[in-house]
Amino acid sequence: MVELMKALVLGIIQGFTEFLPISSTGHLLIFRKLFGLSEAGLFLDTMLHLGTLISVFIIFWDDILQLLKKPFSKLALLIIVGTIPTAIIGLTFEDYFEGISKTGVTVGWEFLFTGFILWLAESIKGKGYKNVDQIQYKDAFLVGTLQGAAILPAISRSGLTIAGALFRGIDKGTAARFSFLMSIPAILGAVVLQSLKLLKGEELASLHAIGTIPLIVATLASAISGFIAVKWMLAIIQRGSLKVFSIYVWILGIGILISQFLGKW
């Protein structure tokens, strides 16, 4: 029952923090440490991301169908161009970033950096004017590069991609939509790579460490909370302010740095 509750909490955390610009990986790292689940991290994280992928599919199903029907449409090509730098960065530096994720030594600074980018993007977001038809391929490439940089544990993927889109003059609603659609190949790629490792027997210990039922619960909780988070973020980006998220991750980052200084991290 204890493991089940831990899995439920981690699933809820993953779902909300994946699409809110506050870094899901950074939050999972913190709570895994609290729950003593570090040894189950890689496989668990992948299944949690699968849950959030389900939520994106549900919300953007009409867009996905159109992309499948018209694979050479402007939006489809933009997503492909944006995915290229993400894939290159992820595949090239996978082992290095996995090592950083396990230690969490840079997490505090990464939260601070995420907050700075969000604050800066919020300050200029009113200048956005481009819709999907006006987005250039170099815009998509930049957003994809920032998505690749978000492989660091406490750098928010949604935060950097939305900020990057705003920096390129893309309007707020389109920036959020493009960010969430860009997440599909990125998350799907991570799930495939991790599944290949599982088939090779590299992550079987992770599966046994948490258990099958808690894993299913975590995935479902991630999907449900992810659905809520996407809906909420789409509303926030239109009417709210990203600066509240900046303040949150700054407080979190400073708290982690103090904890590291005191030798408790």
Image (spheres, grey):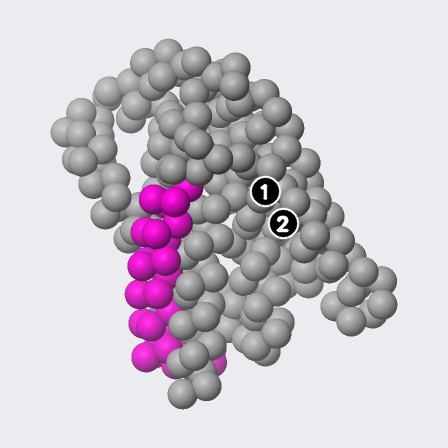
Q: Residue at x 59, y 56 (%)?
A: 26
Q: Position of residue 150 (x, y in %)?
A: 56, 42
Residue 189 visible: no
Q: Residue at x 28, y 53 (%)?
A: 54
Q: Position of residue 142 (x, y in %)?
A: 52, 24
Q: Which residues are magenta?
A: 204-233
Mark 2 crowd level (few <14, some 14–19, many ≥20, 10 Å Cα): some
Q: Nearer the viewer, residue 141 or 124?
A: 124
> Horizontal placement of 105 versus 97: left or right?
right
Q: Is residue 174 above or below residue 148?
A: above
Quickly name the residue at label 2.
Answer: 248
Q: Are marks 1 and 2 in contact (CB under 8 Å)?
A: yes
* Amino acid type indicated by mark 2: Tyr
Q: Quadrant of residue 14?
A: bottom left
Q: Is residue 171 above or below residue 38?
A: above
Q: Quadrant of the C terminus?
A: bottom right
Q: Position of residue 44 (x, y in %)?
A: 44, 67
